[in-house]
Amino acid sequence: MRILVTGAGGFVGRGLMERLLGGALGFDVDEVIAVDQQLDPSVSWHADPRVTAKTIDFASAELLQVLAARPCDLVFHLASVPGSLAEREPTLGKRVNLEASLTLFHHLAAHRRAAPLRVVFASTVAVYGTVTSHAHGRMDEDHPTSPELSYGAHKLMTEVLLGDLSRRGELDAVSLRLPGIVARPLSSGGHGSAFMSDIFHKVAAAQAYTCPVGAGATCWWMSLGTCVENLIHAALIPSARLPASRVVQLPVLTAQVGQVIDAVAGLVGQAAQVTHAPDDRIERLFGRCPPLHTPRARALGFSSDATLETLARRCLPGLAG
Amino acid sequence: MRILVTGAGGFVGRGLMERLLGGALGFDVDEVIAVDQQLDPSVSWHADPRVTAKTIDFASAELLQVLAARPCDLVFHLASVPGSLAEREPTLGKRVNLEASLTLFHHLAAHRRAAPLRVVFASTVAVYGTVTSHAHGRMDEDHPTSPELSYGAHKLMTEVLLGDLSRRGELDAVSLRLPGIVARPLSSGGHGSAFMSDIFHKVAAAQAYTCPVGAGATCWWMSLGTCVENLIHAALIPSARLPASRVVQLPVLTAQVGQVIDAVAGLVGQAAQVTHAPDDRIERLFGRCPPLHTPRARALGFSSDATLETLARRCLPGLAG
């Protein structure tokens, strides 16, 4: 099987690449075309003979030529410009998150072979806009979309296109709405949700940390390991089981920041040195997530980190390295 | 005020052009740039000195140059490839309904002047897919979208873009979800919903007609006159009153085909000579519309044809001509 991974150099992309090349997948991996604008040559898989690394734009004419000559059996489209950057640089965001995505999928649809190509698209909970607790206290899988960032609007538009191309039998897509994935490398600041990853690093290292949301702030959590398992599962799920929209809201672990801090501190056997200095804007955007009820996604075999301990355990190995 | 109308040569476009040039609008019309791939030189407004007719593609480089040199104060984007044609010719549908629309709106956003430009976009109830009666017997304004035609998917994607460009202050858009508008000229066949217009012509002329849905089939109706009033209203409504999505589901008149036939027959004083030979597919697609509950749109001042007689009366003058 030949697989295309866009955004292979990113946080989720690296995790997926390692998993794809590590075996025990339920399918053979003959070649992975790993595409990103930057690919760190020090990563473990860079020297794997099955990897064809392309440090190019994922919708460049060059990639489209590569794909036309060496058609893929499976595509993971992870590349995107993050929400806050796309908001500051709208031309870049539009080009990558909207236009290049549409170009890539229209190209893959137009150059399809006998069976429609399975495409796994990393969409986002940003399609909902600000999620605050509702009267009934929880949020459902068919919660209306109402993006408040161009990032979310462009992802939503791409979801709609993939649903239509799948209906026409030109592609066989699955759009997964991902929450923020943890624990990303310690940030240099700027991302509003960076605290969700930073607390893992700081607490595990027993370092002092000032958290921009209160201990009671409630967020949606998913470890990289669980995210990658869901991506692989999406590659294998029979299309007949998928909804017509081809959109799946992934299950998430809903938990308070203080609970996550306690779980990490308990696992490493260190006292957490966290103080809370809540920033209203960040708390409103990321810290008031209601419970997310996803029975359809769970019935399809998608999963969240089962417990706080699972989440902490899956996030910590990366911290040692 | 300089106004751009795309699709000016179409059924709705002609009605809008006549209304714009007829005065009593609440604003002065200095120039209308009327764009369509075909413009019939026999229409009344073609010789109006205020009209600049352009028989070109609405996203052609030529039009974008015209707009850059003569910026508009108001845009009505009506042009599209109809659903059934777009389904048969997907490349044409994609180019017009998706790519050219995105290009036009991105261009208008990029070349904006001080105040964001009001854009009225003719969207469609096709964004919902097949609407069948629900357990609670009616459909609400926030009914989930689930397009089953590329036409509906492309319109939905354009709605999402316009919501985002409006949020950013780059445009000031209103997307109106229109039902089928009646009474179009007698069709040469092919459109599944053609019967909705054809019954007006056939009953008014006291001609025999075989209707492809039963007398009890329930449809959403809107006369051209009411549609045009809603388009004009959308041009004038203050943006502060609009929802963040900028999407408005227009109120419709929900009525059975038999009721509409009776209203037309009563108005012209002729007995209707209609027999019904229901086609399951057409009845399922167009004849099982639930009552559509639109209190938000009504509070914004949008309206439906108030009664069956209003609908029939507004549709009949066009039949005489």
Image (spheres, coloured by chain):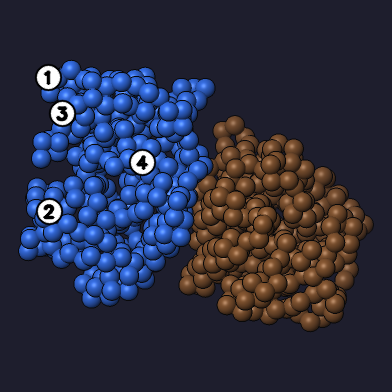
Chain colours: A brown, B blue
Closer to the camera in the image, B296 or B292: B292
Mark 1 or mark 3, whichever is nearer to me: 3
Residue linked to disc 4: B191
Kindly identify which chain the residue marked by label 1 belongs to: B
Indicate the amino acid at tag 3.
Answer: Ala
Q: CA distance from mark 4 to mark 2?
A: 24 Å
Are dots 4 and 2 on a single chain? yes
Q: CA distance from mark 2 to mark 3?
A: 24 Å
Q: CA distance from mark 1 to mark 2?
A: 30 Å
Q: Is residue A145 above or below residue A199?
A: above
Indicate the amino acid at tag 2.
Answer: Val
Mark toward the start of the polypeptide (1 vs 2): 2
Q: Position of residue A247 (x, y in %)?
A: 62, 47
Indicate the amino acid at tag 1.
Answer: Gly
Residue linked to disc 1: B269
Which quarter of the figure has residue B79? bottom left
Mark toward the start of the polypeptide (4 vs 1): 4
Are dots 1 and 2 on a single chain? yes
Indicate the amino acid at tag 4.
Answer: His
Residue beneath the point at 14% across and 38% down: B318
Q: Is residue A292 above or below residue B262?
A: below
Residue beneath the point at 15% across and 36% down: B319
Closer to the camera in the image, B166 or A48: A48
Kindly identify which chain the residue marked by label 4 belongs to: B
- Mark 1 burial class by Cα count in 10 Å: few <14, some 14-19, many 20+: few
Closer to the camera in the image, B217 or A39: B217
Residue linked to disc 2: B43
Which label was assigned to residue A143?
none
- Mark 3 burial class by Cα count in 10 Å: few <14, some 14-19, many 20+: some
Mark toward the start of the polypeptide (1 vs 3): 3
Residue linked to disc 3: B205
